[in-house]
Structure formats: C-alpha cells, structure tokens
Image (spheres, rainbow, N blue to C red):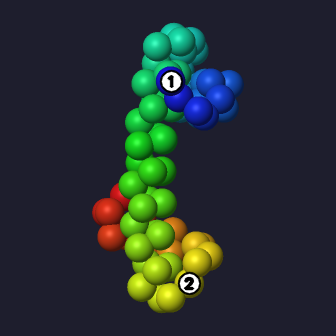
Amino acid sequence: MAEIPKAPIARIIKDTGAERVSEDAKVELAEALEEIARNIAIKANEAARLAKRKTIKAEDIKFAVNELDL
C-alpha cells in the first residue's frame, strides 16, 4: 500500500487535464512515485556517505536525480 496520500496524487493527475481519476490509478501512481523516491534516497545517501556526512543535502538529491537520469 502506498504511503503518499491519494488526494495530492489525484490533483497531480487532474492538473494534466484528466476529468476523473480511478482509485486504482491513484494507488499505482503513488506506488511508482514512492519507488522512484526510494531510489533517489538510496543514491543520495550514498553521495552523502562518500562526502563523509550523515545528513543528506539538496545537492545529494540533485546528484541522485542526475545519476538516475530522471
């Protein structure tokens, strides 16, 4: 089950012009976004560790997004 609330997911989809969004579509997008976020967090954590930091910074997130080609 997705941890991201369905209401913001529905708004994101509706912002693209969709009139209606099924519950299944909300769950699927939330799960996909969580997987992407998890991969970014893993890569950002690696970057922070290589920099000998315990704190993940915005620069680590940007690096991870670029590394993962998102």
Q: Nearer the viewer, residue 41 or 20?
A: 41
Measuring from the top left, give residue 11's x and y in whole percent.
Answer: 64, 29
Residue occupied by mark 1: 1
Q: Which residue is located at x 48 percent, y 50 percent? A: 37
Relative to 49, residue 20 above or below: above
Looking at the rendered image, the quarter that the C terminus falls into is bottom left
Residue occupied by mark 2: 53
Q: CA distance from mark 1 to mark 2?
A: 32 Å
**Crowding at mark 2 (Cα within 10 Å: few <14, some 14-19, many 20+):** few
Res 34 visible: yes
Q: Residue furthest bottom?
A: 51
Res 11 visible: no
Type of amino acid under label 2: Arg
Q: Which residue is located at x 41 percent, y 48 percent? A: 36
SS at mark 2 in the image: loop
Q: Which residue is located at x 41 percent, y 36 percent? A: 32
SS at mark 1 in the image: loop
Q: Nearer the viewer, residue 10 or 24?
A: 24
Measuring from the top left, give residue 20's x and y in whole percent.
Answer: 56, 12
Q: Which of the 4 image quarters holds residue 4?
A: top right
Type of amino acid under label 1: Met
